[in-house]
Amino acid sequence: VQLQASGGGLVQPGGFLRLSCVASGFTWDYYSIGWFRQAPGKEREGVSCMSSSDGSTYDADSVKGRFTFSRDRARKTVYLQMNSLKPEDTAVYYCAAYASCNGPPLGWGQGTLVTVSS
């Protein structure tokens, strides 16, 4: 399984970005897929996850109402639309595979850096 994330960059507070993740060799019906982030000096934080069982998405409280997870199975791609960005959203974002959305990531690809700053 290869998970290739892209779309990060520098954005002002209140701005938006859309992250993309191409999942090669990914079995959609077996693994859940999602995003976690890690800021310098901080622990890894789960951001959003889509369950393999029913497609339900689970978002961290810190991003609810601002971030939206979606997928395009035909393109083997998932997206994280991030709106109303805050400086505290600054982190490296990773696309990851999970056995279930309430567990730790099983594997992830290279992250993409999101910097929210004026």
Image: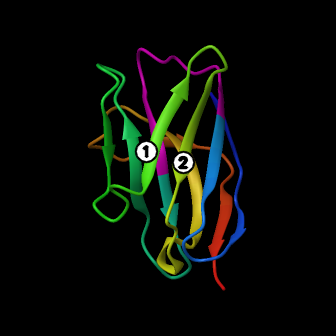
Give residue 77's position: percent from left, percent from top. 62, 28
**10 Å neighbourhood of mark 1: few (<14), some, or many (≥20)?**
some
Q: Is residue 32 magenta?
A: yes
Residue pictured at 64% horizontal, 19% vertical: 25
As drawn, the label of residue 105 is: 1
Residue pictured at 42% horizontal, 14% vertical: 29
105 displayed left or right of 102: right
Q: Is mark 1 on a helix, strand or loop?
A: strand
Label 1 and label 2: CA atoms lie apart by 20 Å
Q: Which amino acid type is marked by label 2?
A: Gln
**75 above or below 8?**
above
- Image quadrant assignment for residue 52: top left
Give residue 76's position: percent from left, percent from top. 63, 22
Residue pictured at 60% horizontal, 60% vertical: 16
Which marked residue is nearer to the observer: mark 1 or mark 2?
A: 2
90 displayed left or right of 48: right
**115 above or below 65?**
below
**72 above or below 36?**
above
Pick the quarter of the image with the N terminus. Answer: top right
Give residue 17's position: percent from left, percent from top. 63, 56
Pick the quarter of the image with the C terminus. Answer: bottom right
Q: Which of 73 and 92 is in front in this view?
A: 73
Q: How many marks?
A: 2
Q: What element carries label 2?
A: strand
Q: Nearer the viewer, residue 117 or 46?
A: 117
Q: Which amino acid type is marked by label 1?
A: Pro
As drawn, the label of residue 20 is: none
Region in magenta:
22-35
